[in-house]
Image: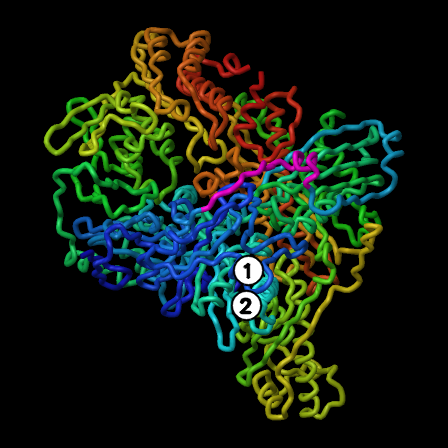
């Protein structure tokens, strides 16, 4: 089914924050940020900058009426730096001017001096120097210490994975203006309006009810606007509050790239023990997460790395430990997968190495250890309704033919080599690190013309959540989709909303919407039963806007019943609250039931390597994915395709580079390359049949993040192609696998 | 005063010549379908069509409005997404909706523009040409698979007419709105007066294609070379090929003269930047920018090219290999203009190859590039030119290697020996494009690649690589 929201996109009529028509007199802000990675501010002089023509104000921490603190998990994040700076790009002051160019010019006239301090950019160095955020965390299962003695093969090694820039095409943007009685309205491109509202409240020392945050849609988020839209929104709110003016702040691409955090780079150690026949008995892993200078969401992200350390495999003896290492980079943050890709890359590397040592293909080990229903995860939960094997089997169909084709190709070609990799995935669905967040509210209004307005906390950022909610409503009422309008996400309508993240927006908000609609439907049927003189509502059903009694159409229809409800003073508004049932977790034991359910799948990736030049192409990706019963196959397929390419980008061409002083060298789209249409592989998505999921909305499964993990297969497909050229080569695990790394490994002397 | 037609509306403005069209559209006109993505011409969210009157027809190019100054649209027809909208979705828009080829929607107007340009300009409607047409549009959401489905669908749906004029065919098929019919006539009435640029004051900013982001500086005069129409074009005369300095990459790529001289030029140049950038980036601009990795500098160095400079009074000609003095320093006075680049026509026994490798993906600036031209005589190398970029402070002509190879037979031992000489000539630095070690290795590989590609019978890759 087509996503009707996209009708506006193709005409360029969808409004993003930067597109709003501004009231006359709107001022523009620019951020002055730290040019050094670590130091004490010894001198800050704003006078010259204030003299620039067109400047209205320069705000620093001194101008903050409330608490200069926006840390969401740990209170370690001043909104504007005071006394010390901890990363290049850390906001220090906000310049307000007639236009954005003037504001940016004035930031260059701000005089600042520092006493520089040594900076750390490497996670392991931070670990050695005990620069850690919070306590280390360990998940375990079985007894790792005694397990090794039963293993026939033991491999160990080190794995590196790099950061990743979100490149939402719409940069961070916000518009704020004062309302009467000291309040504020803030239009923010955020995945978390509630956090924006809460932080504005505490920074400005205003009650939350005075702050309205409204979000129409985002031009991409991918996690980068879950927590890191907040600082810009709060700064802009501060300016609007202080100056009593409308203020707009839109980051330029280079500012956005320099100042905001990215996917966390990880450095990891693994040890894996197996039997001769490929059964994994023991797996030990230590993650050194490069958090950057501030906690941000790092603890939650590390949690997901640990929870997904064993990917889609059952391993009886596991020990997974993680350290949050504090470095002098911008605070790394949520990015599709939320730590799981980093964890899964490590175990896939371990399997590759084990297979190399045993002289077998990795897929032999992968298949042998797939999760079965009833297997236990290291976090204590048992697998319910595993689809790991069914996805694998469907994907593996005709695999011998593929293998043969690749062998033939490699025999004929001396300079071109092909490689193939399989990758199974398993991804747990819930806010597993903060179980209280697994709740949502919805408000449904029906107007007397029969049109329906729905408010939820779900943010539309391209994932099609609005369309899915619209479908849910249209389906329950059996009315035309055009009757349903999904409103902007607004903190005045929906209080305390959880962020749109963790792939959960459709599940949580869709379920709340469903409950609200069912209440209205019940009221409608009660009235109809009275009018038709039937005792029970059970035999009543709306079919395509006509009320049916025992399957036969009546004279009553949607439109007339709604008017009747109004005339009979029956409420046409309903609110509902939904929470995911049966979630619990004992943090002292690190065991519980933290996930609602799991999403499974398998992908096969093929790559062709030019062994003369070191360049490669990911040719194809075949995915068999467990969608449950998809609400909207077109949208869900698009989520898989998009996530796969992002995942491949992370593994291959997306590389962040820094100068020795910690400044980002890859701060433009000319230096930081993301996949374009020439690079993107052909993707084929197969829907696993007969998968039901009573815990998802209408039996569907969450879709946003899990397919990102398929991209990890690209690394191993290229490695296989490299080995086809150099059979003696042994796998090194350091992503992204750039052409530079490929060529240097192929011709290492 | 700058006059042009914006969609269906005549515009006359006194705004600064240097103002970017993107800012004009969004801040001055409140036309917001054209999005700000990067302001460096890298993402395509700001694409618009710019139509130029050519006799009684208008030819349209998809251009990055973030790089395009108002000065360059005088007398033109500008088309934004708003100018393509009709009451019903057009077939391109409909296909995007049907295939789910838009998610967040931010890149979508640019993609519609790029596909409209494809329909306006493409010599045939096939998926591979359509893919090239979208090489300047980034999408972070879809992974491009749904966009590829759109391309397939559209190419199946339409067949180009044999006789009919392209624009009227597009109007008939509702890809263009009907007002496009009157645009040629309307443009006749607002043709910008031709100004003749004679001399250049030393303190001026010279803008050719303007594809490298530049800032206007109020203390400097900005000169837009597009005023000098005589600087564009490709001609053969007296056994040499002359290319005007403002000839674009696109024009060279599609020139029949160039295609005849270099049968693979379309393939080589298709890898440079993106379609919108190739429509703007010029030969002169690329050479004057003197980037050590400049693709065109490397290409033309291997042709033994020369450069004509003119200060308004005197013209002088110097060999391109003497043009690059040191890092970003060139043999050009500030009042001189590079007017054209020319090279002797290669004879029928000439071999030519161009290689470029990027560390990440083809779309970016390469780590190392190299070009070679060889004239063989009686089994020996009679004359050879070899250039390499990314391996020295300047686009490098590898003189020692060239000297060594001249007169030699092509065989593995000779090439290996020459490869070592080439290594001694280069001095690459570590940067975002790669480490010193990588660039050394990569140049060796590309040097071998030249001979493996051109002389497969003499040079077996297995002998040279393993």
The quadrant in which the N terminus of chain B is found is bottom left
Residue at 12 percent of width and 34 percent of height: B312
Q: Nearer the viewer, residue A718 or A46?
A: A46
Above or below, comparing residue A21 to residue B39 in the picture: below
Furthest toward the left, the residue is: B313
Q: Position of residue B82 (x, y in %)?
A: 35, 62
Residue A190's disc number: 1
Q: Residue at x 28, y 63 (%)?
A: B178
Q: Is residue A575 above or below residue A646?
A: below
Q: Chain of mark 1?
A: A
Identified at 52% across, 73% down, the residue is A183
Asked if residue A17 lies left or right of residue A608, the reply is left
**Measured from the top left, where is residue A114 in percent x and y?**
51, 42
Quick check: is A644 in the magenta stretch?
no
Check if mark 2's residue and mark 1's residue have beta carbons within 8 Å: yes
In the image, what residue occupies the spot 65% across and 63% down? A498
Q: Is residue B450 left or right of residue A376?
A: left
Image x and y of residue B132, in percent: 40, 42
The vertical placement of B133 against A481, above or below, is: above
Task: Name the residue tied to disc 2.
Answer: A213
Tags 2 and 1 on a common chain: yes
Q: Is residue A117 magenta?
A: yes
Say which quarter of the image contains residue A355: top right
From the viewer's perspective, tell me whether residue A20 is left or right of residue A305. left
Are there few (<14), some (14-19), or many (20+) residues within 10 Å of tag 1?
many
- Give the quadrant of the C terminus of chain B: top right
- Quadrant hosting residue A397: top right
Q: Give the label on residue A368, or none.
A: none
Q: Which residues are magenta?
A: A112-131
């Amino acid at each position: 089914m087509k996503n009707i929201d996209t009708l506006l996109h193709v005409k360029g009529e969808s409004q993003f924050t930067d597109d709003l028509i501004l009231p006359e007199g709107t001022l523009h802000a620019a951020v002055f940020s730290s040019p050094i990675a670590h130091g004490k501010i010894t001198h800050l002089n704003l006078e010259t900058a204030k003299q620039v023509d067109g400047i209205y104000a320069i705000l620093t921490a001194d101008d903050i009426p409330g608490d200069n603190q926006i840390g969401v998990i740990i209170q370690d994040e001043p909104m504007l730096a005071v006394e010390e700076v901890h990363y290049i790009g850390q906001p220090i002051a906000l310049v307000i001017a007639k236009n954005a160019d003037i504001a940016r010019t004035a930031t260059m006239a701000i005089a600042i001096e520092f006493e520089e301090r040594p900076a750390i950019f490497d996670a392991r160095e931070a670990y050695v120097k005990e620069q850690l955020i919070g306590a280390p965390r360990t998940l375990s299962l079985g007894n790792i210490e005694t397990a090794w003695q039963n293993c026939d093969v033991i491999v160990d090694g080190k794995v590196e994975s790099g950061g990743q820039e979100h490149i939402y095409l719409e940069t961070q943007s916000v518009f704020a203006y004062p309302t009467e009685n000291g309040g504020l309205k803030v239009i923010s491109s955020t995945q978390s309006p509630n956090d924006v509202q809460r932080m504005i409240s505490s920074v400005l020392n205003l009650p939350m009810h005075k702050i309205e945050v409204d979000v129409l849609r985002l031009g991409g988020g991918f996690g980068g606007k879950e927590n890191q839209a907040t600082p810009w929104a709060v700064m802009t709110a501060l300016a609007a509050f202080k100056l009593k003016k409308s203020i707009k702040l839109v980051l330029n691409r280079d500012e956005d790239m320099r100042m905001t955090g990215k996917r966390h780079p990880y450095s990891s150690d693994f040890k894996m023990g197996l039997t001769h026949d490929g059964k994994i008995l023991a797996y030990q892993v230590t993650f050194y997460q490069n958090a950057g200078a501030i906690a941000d969401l790092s603890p939650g992200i590390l949690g997901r790395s640990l929870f997904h350390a064993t990917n889609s495999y059952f391993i009886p003896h596991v020990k997974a430990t993680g350290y949050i290492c504090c470095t002098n980079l911008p605070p790394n943050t949520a990015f599709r997968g939320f730590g799981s890709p980093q964890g899964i890359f490590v175990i896939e590397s371990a399997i590759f190495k084990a297979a190399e040592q045993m002289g077998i293909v990795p897929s032999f080990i992968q298949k042998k250890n797939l999760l079965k229903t009833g297997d236990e995860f290291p976090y204590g939960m048992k697998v319910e309704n595993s689809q790991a094997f069914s996805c694998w089997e469907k994907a593996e169909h005709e695999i011998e033919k593929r293998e043969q084709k690749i062998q033939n190709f490699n025999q004929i070609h001396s300079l071109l080599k092909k490689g193939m990799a399989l990758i199974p995935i398993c991804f747990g669905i819930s806010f597993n690190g903060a179980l209280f967040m697994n709740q949502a509210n919805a408000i449904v209004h029906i107007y007397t013309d029969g049109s329906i307005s729905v408010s939820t906390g779900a943010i539309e950022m391209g994932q099609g959540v609005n369309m899915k909610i619209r479908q849910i409503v249209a389906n329950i009422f059996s009315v035309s989709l055009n009757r349903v309008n999904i409103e902007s996400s607004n903190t005045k309508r929906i209080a305390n909303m959880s962020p749109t993240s963790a792939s959960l927006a459709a599940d949580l908000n869709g379920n709340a919407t469903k409950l609200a609609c069912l209440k209205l439907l019940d009221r409608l049927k009660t009235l109809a039963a009275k009018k038709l003189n039937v005792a029970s509502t059970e035999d009543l059903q709306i079919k395509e806007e006509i009320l049916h009694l025992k399957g036969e159409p009546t004279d009553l229809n949607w439109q007339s019943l709604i008017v009747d409800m109004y005339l009979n003073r029956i409420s046409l508004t309903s609110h509902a609250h939904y929470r995911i049932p049966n979630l619990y977790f004992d943090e002292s034991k690190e065991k519980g039931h933290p996930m609602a359910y799991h999403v499974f799948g398998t992908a096969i990736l093929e790559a062709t390597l030019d062994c003369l030049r070191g360049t490669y192409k990911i040719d194809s990706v075949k995915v068999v994915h467990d969608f449950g019963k998809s609400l909207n196959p077109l949208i869900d397929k698009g989520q898989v395709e998009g996530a796969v390419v992002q995942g491949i980008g992370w593994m291959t061409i997306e590389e962040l580079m820094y100068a020795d002083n910690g400044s980002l060298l890859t701060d433009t789209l000319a230096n930081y390359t993301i996949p374009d249409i020439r690079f993107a592989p052909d993707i084929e998505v197969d829907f696993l049949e007969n998968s039901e999921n009573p815990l998802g909305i209408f039996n569907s499964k969450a879709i946003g993040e899990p397919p990102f993990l398929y991209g990890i297969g690209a690394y191993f497909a290229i490695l296989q192609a490299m080995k086809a050229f150099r059979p003696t080569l042994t796998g090194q695990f350091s992503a992204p696998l750039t052409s530079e790394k490929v060529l240097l490994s192929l011709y290492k002397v | 005063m700058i006059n042009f037609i914006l969609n269906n509306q005549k515009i006359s403005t006194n705004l600064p010549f240097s103002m970017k069209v993107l800012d004009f559209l969004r801040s001055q006109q409140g036309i917001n379908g054209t999005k700000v993505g990067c302001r460096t011409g890298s993402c395509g969210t700001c694409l618009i069509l710019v139509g130029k009157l050519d006799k009684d027809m208008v030819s349209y190019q998809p251009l990055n409005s973030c790089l395009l100054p108002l000065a360059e649209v005088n007398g033109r027809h500008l088309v934004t997404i708003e100018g393509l909208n009709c009451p019903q979705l057009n077939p391109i828009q409909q296909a995007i909706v049907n295939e789910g080829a838009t998610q967040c929607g931010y890149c979508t107007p640019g993609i519609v523009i790029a596909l409209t340009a494809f329909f306006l300009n493409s010599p045939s409607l096939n998926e591979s040409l359509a893919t090239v047409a979208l090489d300047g549009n980034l999408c972070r959401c879809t992974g491009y698979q749904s966009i590829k489905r759109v391309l397939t669908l559209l190419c199946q749906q339409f067949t180009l007419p044999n006789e009919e004029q392209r624009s009227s065919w597009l109007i008939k098929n509702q890809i263009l709105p009907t007002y496009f019919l009157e645009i040629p006539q309307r443009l006749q009435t607002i043709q910008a007066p031709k100004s003749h640029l004679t001399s250049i004051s030393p303190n001026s900013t010279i803008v050719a294609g303007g594809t490298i982001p530049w800032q206007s500086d109020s203390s400097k005069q900005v000169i837009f070379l597009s005023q000098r129409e005589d600087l564009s074009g490709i001609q053969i005369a007296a056994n040499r090929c002359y290319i005007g300095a403002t000839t674009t990459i696109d024009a060279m790529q599609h020139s029949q003269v160039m295609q005849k001289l270099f049968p693979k030029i379309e393939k080589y140049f298709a890898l440079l930047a993106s379609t919108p950038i190739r429509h703007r980036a010029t030969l002169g601009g690329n050479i004057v920018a003197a980037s050590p990795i400049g693709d065109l500098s490397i290409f033309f160095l291997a042709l033994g090219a020369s450069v004509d400079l003119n200060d308004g009074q005197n013209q002088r000609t110097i060999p391109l290999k003497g043009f690059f003095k040191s890092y970003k320093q060139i043999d050009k006075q500030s009042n001189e203009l590079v007017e054209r680049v020319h090279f002797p026509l290669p004879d029928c026994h000439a071999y030519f190859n161009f290689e470029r490798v990027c560390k990440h993906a083809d779309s970016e600036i390469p780590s190392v590039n190299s070009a070679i031209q060889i004239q063989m005589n009686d089994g020996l190398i009679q004359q050879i030119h070899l250039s390499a970029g990314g391996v020295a402070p300047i686009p490098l002509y590898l003189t020692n290697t060239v000297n060594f190879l001249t007169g030699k037979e092509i065989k593995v031992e000779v090439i290996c020996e020459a490869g070592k000489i080439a290594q001694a000539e280069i001095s690459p630095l570590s940067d975002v494009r790669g480490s010193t070690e990588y660039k050394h290795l990569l140049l060796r590989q590309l040097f071998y690649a030249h001979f493996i590609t051109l002389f497969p019978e003499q040079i077996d890759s297995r002998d040279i690589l393993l």
